[in-house]
Image (cartoon, grey):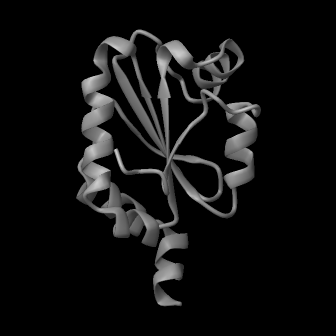
């Protein structure tokens, strides 16, 4: 995919998803992508859309974490269901998480990069960053 700089997978991580997101708080925005195994075309579509605009992703301090349903450990699945209201039956879900750690937007289908960037660029912290 060529997304090694911004795409991450938590499948081989020793840390929980909650710990990873906590580490990113105050420093990075996160697009957290979840896809069922039988709906990987959505996850691939989202990754390809972002791959085409890598500079914009980097400029907005955005990390992308991709979760494949069958590789998500049970504690992480419970965290997603409780904190992110994940419905495991959904084929695709994505959450835009701000630097403050809060969910800014939830998506049930892949989001166009321009729409994602528009949401990020409307955030107060991003507006401040743009001024500096």
Q: Is residue 127 above or below residue 121?
A: below
Query: Can you give x and y, in whole percent of width and height, for residue 120 in the image?
Result: 41, 62
- What is the total number of numbered labels drawn onto the structure image? 0
> The N terminus lies in which quarter of the figure?
top left
Relative depth, front residue between 23 and 117: 23
Q: Quadrant of residue 107?
A: top left
Name the residue at the front extreme: 2
Q: Is residue 41 above or below residue 118?
A: above
Relative depth, front residue between 55 and 96: 55
Q: Residue at x 67, y 33 (%)?
A: 17
Q: Residue at x 26, y 45 (%)?
A: 48
Residue 35 visible in rendering? yes
Q: Residue at x 49, y 57 (%)?
A: 5
Residue 110 visible in rendering? no
Q: Residue at x 33, y 54 (%)?
A: 116
Relative depth, front residue between 98 and 54: 54
Query: Can you give x and y, in whole percent of width and height, for residue 18 in the image?
Result: 71, 35
Query: Can you give x and y, in whole percent of width and height, for residue 99 in the image?
Result: 61, 59
Horizontal placement of 13 versus 42: left or right?
Answer: right
Q: Quadrant of residue 19?
A: top right
Q: Is residue 67 above or below residue 119?
A: above
Query: Can you give x and y, in whole percent of width and height, for residue 110 in the image?
Result: 28, 37
């Amino acid at each position: 995919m060529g997304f090694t700089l911004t795409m991450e997978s938590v499948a081989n991580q020793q840390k929980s998803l909650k710990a990873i997101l906590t580490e990113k708080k105050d420093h990075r925005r996160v697009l957290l992508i979840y896809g069922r195994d039988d709906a990987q075309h959505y996850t691939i579509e989202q990754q390809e859309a972002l791959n085409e605009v890598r500079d914009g992703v980097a400029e907005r301090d955005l990390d992308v974490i991709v979760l494949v349903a069958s590789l998500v450990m049970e504690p992480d699945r419970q965290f997603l269901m409780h904190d992110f209201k994940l419905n495991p039956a959904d084929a695709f879900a994505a959450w835009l998480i701000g630097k403050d750690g809060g969910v800014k937007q939830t998506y049930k289908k892949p989001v166009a990069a321009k729409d994602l960037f528009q949401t990020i660029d409307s955030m107060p912290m991003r507006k401040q960053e743009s001024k500096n």
